[in-house]
Image (spheres, rainbow, N blue to C red):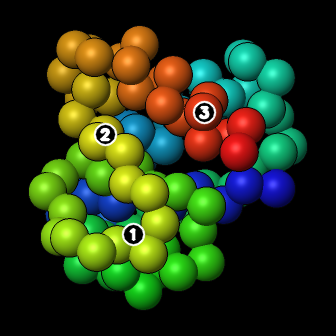
């Protein structure tokens, strides 16, 4: 079971959109039941990331995070989603 953190500024708005899109993608590509997603504020990522396999952030993240952090902006703009989902699959298969 992969633990994924999705972080945004408030932990509510854009992380909810990102969560829906990532969940839909993962379910459509055979990962249903193989992941757990938690949303949080980006300020909580340093702590919550300690127990995560990877994170997706829709905003700027500080350095030295305890897990890999993928840029989630493509989930909001639609530009670069292929690369992001490729990176998500790479993390799921580690």
Question: Residue drawn 38% across and 54% down?
Answer: 69
Residue 50 drawn above or below residue 83: below
Residue under circle 1?
A: 40
Separation of residues labelled 2 and 3 (CA atoms): 15 Å
Figure label count: 3
Name the residue carrying label 2. Answer: 72
- Residue 90: mark in rendering: 3
Q: Are marks 2 and 3 in contact (CB under 8 Å)?
A: no
Can I make out residue 4 in this image?
yes
Residue 55 in the image: state x and y as whole percent.
Answer: 45, 56
- Please say if 44 is above or below 68: below
Q: In this view, does 89 lie to the left or right of 10?
A: right
User: Element at badge 2?
Assistant: loop
Note whether residue 12 is visible. no
Residue 86: numbered disc? none
Q: Going 47% across and 66% down the picture, which residue do you hit? A: 67
- Lower sequence index among marks 1 and 2: 1
Q: Distance between the residues labelled 1 and 2?
A: 13 Å
Q: Where is residue 24 in the image (x, y as percent from the top left)?
A: 61, 26
Q: Nearer the viewer, residue 64 or 35?
A: 64
The residue drawn where x is 20% and y is 63% is 61
């Amino acid at each position: 079971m992969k633990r994924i953190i999705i972080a945004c500024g408030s932990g509510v708005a854009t992380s909810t959109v990102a969560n829906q899109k990532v969940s839909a993608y993962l379910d459509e590509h055979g990962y249903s039941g193989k992941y757990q997603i938690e949303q949080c504020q980006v300020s909580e990522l340093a702590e919550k990331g300690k127990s995560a396999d990877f994170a997706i952030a829709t905003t700027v993240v500080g350095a030295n995070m305890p897990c890999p952090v993928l840029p989630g902006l493509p989930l909001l703009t639609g530009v670069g989603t292929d690369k992001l989902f490729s990176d998500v699959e790479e993390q799921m298969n580690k």
